[in-house]
Amino acid sequence: MGAEKGLGLKEKSSRKSAGIVIPIDGPAGSGKSTAAKRIAERLDFDYLESGALYRAVGYRVLRKNQEGDFENRAVDSARDLRFECRKEGSVWRNILDGEDVTDALRDEEISDMASRVSAIPGVRAALLDFQRNFGRKRGAVIDGRDIGTVVFPEARLKFFLDADIEVRIQRRFAELKARGVSFDTDRLREDLKRRDERDRHRSSAPLRKAEDAVEIKTNNMGVDQVLEVMLEKLRLVYGEVIEDA
Ligand code: DC
């Protein structure tokens, strides 16, 4: 005894889960971020939305770092990133350089810029360390495109969420509507398809399912259903670490 005396439940569970990383990859609109946040909450793990890291780099390039050629600006912007996903009440906020940029990062021009900077190997290399350091501290859920293939290929359990393109487009429309953002449906459809193509076919860490990832097609599934499938797999692999979830 002794060693655990005085530790709260959270501290105990974070000790047991230290080093466990749960990668959740998939294209935009597959439902990966929603599922990832819910899993992190259920397990009391840290959460990192790696797409927001690339958006943060895009934000710095567009708004802060305008000297020099595009590639250098992008790589420079990816260095020394001060970024975190922080839960405030029931909402996850993205904090960049001490500033709450949650809404700004969702702008369409930032989405496009994020996809462009994410194709640059120097940007990916700079963000790799950030992501690996993040995952080392305590239990972590990280969502993205290459978390299971490149960032944490050794993870014992990884997920790949997917859905048909039309379903994903409709989800994006619904999300923007809910936020009260006006948009041109045709343009949005084209933008999403273009980004999808770029993410899947770039030479550096393209979006693809890791061979050992559990694939979940979310077309006709609600978030709770997706969550149940994931938790079942997690219980099988990590047993007592997540026994209370
Ligand atoms: O998930 P998202 O739409 O917020 O991601 C924004 C862009 O970042 C997207 O075009 C793909 C890219 N990305 C990436 O290349 N690797 C990741 N691990 C996460 C996102």
Image (cartoon, rainbow, N blue to C red):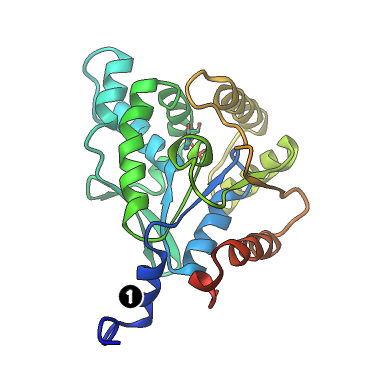
Image x and y of residue 126, in percent: 30, 31
The residue under the point 71% across, 35% down is 165
Image x and y of residue 31, in percent: 62, 50
Give the quadrant of residue 166. Answer: top right
**Residue 238 can be seen in this image:** yes
Image x and y of residue 174, in percent: 64, 49
Which residue is labeled 1 in the image?
11
Q: Amino acid at mark 1?
A: Glu
- On the rendered structure, is 16 left or right of 206? left
Cβ of disc 1 within 8 Å of ligand 1? no
Of residues 175 and 193, the one drawn nearer to the viewer in this rendering: 193
User: Is 41 rendered above or below residue 119?
Assistant: below
Give the quadrant of residue 45. Answer: bottom left
**Residue 63 can be seen in this image:** no
- On the rendered structure, is 152 left or right of 188? left
The residue under the point 33% across, 83% down is 8
Of residues 111 and 119, the one drawn nearer to the viewer in this rendering: 119
The residue under the point 22% across, 50% down is 98
Tell me the SS state at disc 1. Answer: helix
Mark 1 Cα shell of 10 Å, populated few (<14), some (14-19), many (≥20): few
The residue under the point 64% across, 25% down is 190
User: Is 64 rendered above or below residue 86?
Assistant: above
